[in-house]
Every structure is written in C-alpha cells, then in structure tokens.
Amino acid sequence: MGWILLIVVVALLIWRIMPAKGVRTISTEELKGMLKDKSKQFVDVRTPGEYKRQHIKEFKNIPLHELNAKMIHLDKTKETIVICQSGMRSSKAAALLKKAGFADVLNVRGGMGAWHE
C-alpha cells in the first residue's frame, strides 16, 4: 500500500513540472535574445510585490490569479513568453493561455530565480 502511495505522489510531481502540451520551454539565456523583439509579448505572472522587487522591463505584470480575467488584453496571435519566480506558476499560466487559444506560448525555465543580467 505504501508503494502505491509513493508512486502516485511521484507521478503527480512529475505531471506538475511537465510543460503543458504545445508549450515550449526556454532558458533565460534564450530569453535574453528575444527581449527586443516587438512581435512578442512578455507576461510576468508573479505577485505585484515580487514584480516590484525585481523584474525585466519588457514584461507586463499580470498575476496568475488575475490572468483569466486579463488575458483579453493580450494578443492571441503574438508569441507569448511567460515567467514567474521558479517556473511553476508560469507553467500553469502557459497552460491556461494555450487552452484559451494562444498560438505560441513559451515558459521560461527557472524563472526569475535563474535570471542573471
């Protein structure tokens, strides 16, 4: 019985960290090469407090809990790059955007925790 529970817990953890279907994952190094591209939109899904402490100027702050209501202000046809602190919330946000019909969604692996200017 204990082994079954352990397998279920491990499977859930793996499922949570896997990117959503159709969402690509990029590194912070790859992100640096994209920041000047005006054809892309950048979304930071951290809280306003986290965003205020440290952010990348090209990113618009839309906290994850507000994303459903505010995604109408985003362009579904533009490539959308999503970031958070570690990559977990942005992975959830990327899945929401994909489900809502956004064409190209990228999640930044490691989030702001991996960001070095």
Image (cartoon, rainbow, N blue to C red):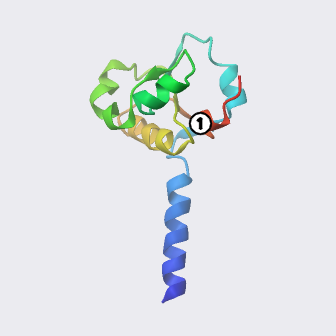
Residue 21, given in percent of the width and then of the height, sits at 50, 46
Residue at the location (48% across, 89% down)?
1
Q: Which residue is mark 1?
A: 111
Depicted 40 relative to depicted 88: above or below: above
Question: Residue farthest to the bottom?
Answer: 1
Q: Amino acid at mark 1?
A: Gly
Secondary structure of the residue carrying numbered label 1: helix
Residue 38, given in percent of the width and then of the height, sits at 55, 10
Residue at the location (50% across, 42% down)?
91
Question: Quarter of the image holding residue 25?
Answer: top right
Residue 82, given in percent of the width and then of the height, sits at 51, 31
Residue 29, given in percent of the width and then of the height, sits at 72, 28
Depicted 40 relative to depicted 10: above or below: above
Q: Nearer the viewer, residue 81 or 76?
A: 81
31 to the left or right of 69: right
Residue at the location (50% across, 83% down)?
4
Question: Is disc 1 surrounded by few (<14), some (14 to 19) or many (20+) residues within 10 Å?
Answer: many
User: Can residue 103 be spotted in the picture?
Assistant: no
